[in-house]
Amino acid sequence: MQHTQPHLEQHKKSWLQVFRNIFTARMLTALVMGFAGGLPLFLTSTVLQAWMKESGVDLGTIGLFALVGLPYTLKFVWAPLMDRYIPSLLGRRRGWLLVWQLLLTASIAMLATSDPSRLLMMTAIAALLLSFFSASQDIVIDAYRRESLSDDEQGMGAALYVSGYRVGILLATGGGLIMADFMSYQSVYLIMAATMAACIVATLLAQEPEMNHGHPDTLREAVIDPFKEYFTRDYAIAILLFVFLYKVGDIMASQMTIPFYLELGFSKTEIGSIVKVFGFWATICGTLLGGMIIMRFGIFFGLMWFGILQALSTAGFAALSFIGHDPVALGVVIAFENLSGGLGTAAFVGFMASLTDKRFTATQFALLTSFMGMPRVFAAAPTGFMAESMGWPAFFIFCTLIAIPGLLLLYWLNKRLHEKT
């Protein structure tokens, strides 16, 4: 069996080649598919929570609705089905995308016809279905992007995908809540269903990736071979450890930022306008800039230097704890943090894409993204206790320093993999 090795070194392009590669149909498809992936993500949380609260649903029940997000953490379980089976229309990737997007549109419309005050069980079922179909769509979009772009294009493709994803989230959360002030929640969800349906046009127009590398012939191959192929590679465990460690400090710090801002005396309006709105655009700029830099200088350059910037940006929160309530200082810290976070995300997602074998893209990508999400559960859980016992400055310095093991592991991996080539 052939083995896929990670590409930390790749052919570097001139700036002219970089700009030429950005303005292609494949990159535009990555952007639109990112939007389609981000749109439904918070329709089962942020907007739905507001609807339930205004419908008189108690806080305990609202909290339990977080469980409808479980499909996002378990998507690697059914991902092999999308590697093994090929729908009769549009091919392996676009065929499955069409299936999930039609079901997503229907589930959002189903949620629009529910009423949390009278039909709470129907609301819960619709939300769970929406979450399952959304996670399934994510599986196929990740696989499509990996298979339709070359290894050199993965960073830029990831950057455009993440940018589209965040625009979709912004429309669903900020746009959805604003619209709910002027119309019913049922109307808001019907508009979101129509927007989701419009994304199907991109699926129909997109080009199906070629299956030059083959695909699993049996369900057993689709389930077992992706894991067997990955874990027989050189440094497979070390690479998984790196995937876990790369953003762990950033994740731990971000878990406590809202309580931190409030304790420093920032109002909710200041947090919303500076952290959310201004921060959104800083992240988009960082993500797109990161994609271009990776295409120009390579994935290892991006992972290493963007990782260093991520760590330094976390130290900015420690500095802010001494400065106190200063909106200008908050804006500077947020700009640096979100810009560097966007840079790091572009490199990281592009790197994970290059790890996948194209025969099992859906399964291996789902596994890697699930593993990447583990720090959000395990590392973020104790952060409140840590901040209380250590104090804000020491806590954020700790989050800065904990990035070092991941960067050292990256340097070691690059050296070992370079020696083998």
Image (cartoon, rainbow, N blue to C red):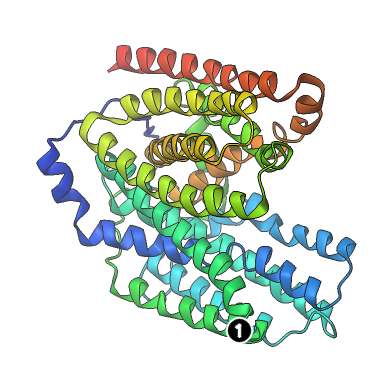
Residue 185, above or below 262: below
Amino acid carrying label 1: it is Phe
Asked whether residue 74 appears in the rendered view, the answer is no
Residue 41 location in percent, x, y?
A: 58, 62
Image quarter of the N terminus: top left
At horizontal 66% and vertical 44% (from top left) the residue drawn is 266
At horizontal 44% and vertical 34% (from top left) the residue drawn is 336
At horizontal 29% and vertical 68% (from top left) the residue drawn is 206
Return the residue nearer the eye: 289 or 412.
289
Q: Secondary structure at mark 1?
A: loop
Residue 134, above or below 375: below
Residue 408 location in percent, x, y?
A: 48, 14
Find disc 1 in the rendering and name its residue: 182
Residue 3, above or below 322: below
Residue 247 location in percent, x, y?
A: 54, 31
Image quarter of the C terminus: top left
* Dot 1 alpha-carbon crowd within 10 angstroms: few under 14, some 14 to 19, many 20 or more: few
Residue 71, above or below 329: below
Return the residue nearer the eye: 73 or 208.
73
Asked whether residue 306 appears in the rendered view, the answer is yes
Indicate left or right for 250 with 168 as reference: right
Residue 217 location in percent, x, y?
A: 45, 55
At horizontal 58% and vertical 65% (from top left) the residue drawn is 173
Return the residue nearer the eye: 316 or 304.
316
Indicate left or right for 23 with 139 as reference: left
Return the residue nearer the eye: 373 or 173.
173
